[in-house]
Amino acid sequence: MDKFITKILSTFFYIGYLPLIPGTFGSLAGIFLFYLVKINALNYTLFTLAVIVVGFLVCGKAEKAMHKNDPRYVVIDEVSGMLLSLIFIPYDIKLVISAFILFRILDTLKPYPAGRLERSKGSIGIMSDDLIAGLYTNLILQVVSRVTSFKTS
């Protein structure tokens, strides 16, 4: 039962098994969750923290169960990173699209210290690069949303 739950949660309800670009599908799942929970900032923050904690709890177990470092099927890290990208960001479709694009670029480029931490084993290695990409995305969008004339709703 533990392996089953680990598999469901780490692949984010099997989204990680979608073909070709599972990380992108995981990021899109994060945006979907953003739209479901965005109404209340406190609830969104608590929800994001809960997903991150669950990610740390299951990713290392998933890596062992799948006998592979950072298996491509594990996408809760992308979901967590995308949720973090959007935390405290004013709701605006342009910002959401920008967050998605920027997060995917930063997740691919692995800016310091993401690349170094990604080489760690277990949950730290799986989760950290996406959380750093999410944090950097969020910081960039916080600045952009304050210095531009994005219309917020």
Image: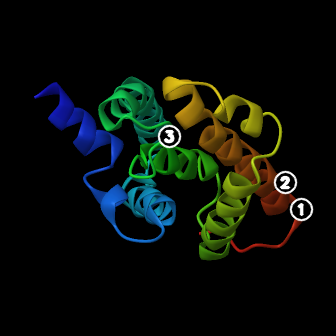
Determine crowd level at label 1: few under 14, some 14-19, many 20+ residues with C-alpha closer than 10 A: few
Residue 39 x/y as whole percent: 43, 54
Q: CA distance from mark 1 to mark 2?
A: 6 Å
Q: Give the mark count.
A: 3
- Circle 2: residue type: Val
Residue found at the very far front of the displayed protein: 67
Q: Considering only vertical position in the picture, is 136 above or below 141?
A: above
Quadrant in the picture for residue 14: bottom left
Q: Quadrant of the N terminus?
A: top left
Residue under label 3: 70
Furthest-right residue in view?
Answer: 147
Task: Work out whether 11 lies above or below 52.
Answer: below
| Residue sitting at x 66%, y 31% | 119
Callout 3: helix, strand or loop?
loop
* Residue assigned mark 2: 143
Q: Which mark is residue 147?
A: 1
Q: Given contact means CB atoms under 8 Å apart, are the residues at marks 1 and 2 in contact?
A: yes
Residue at the spot 40% in from the left edge and 60% down from the top edge: 29
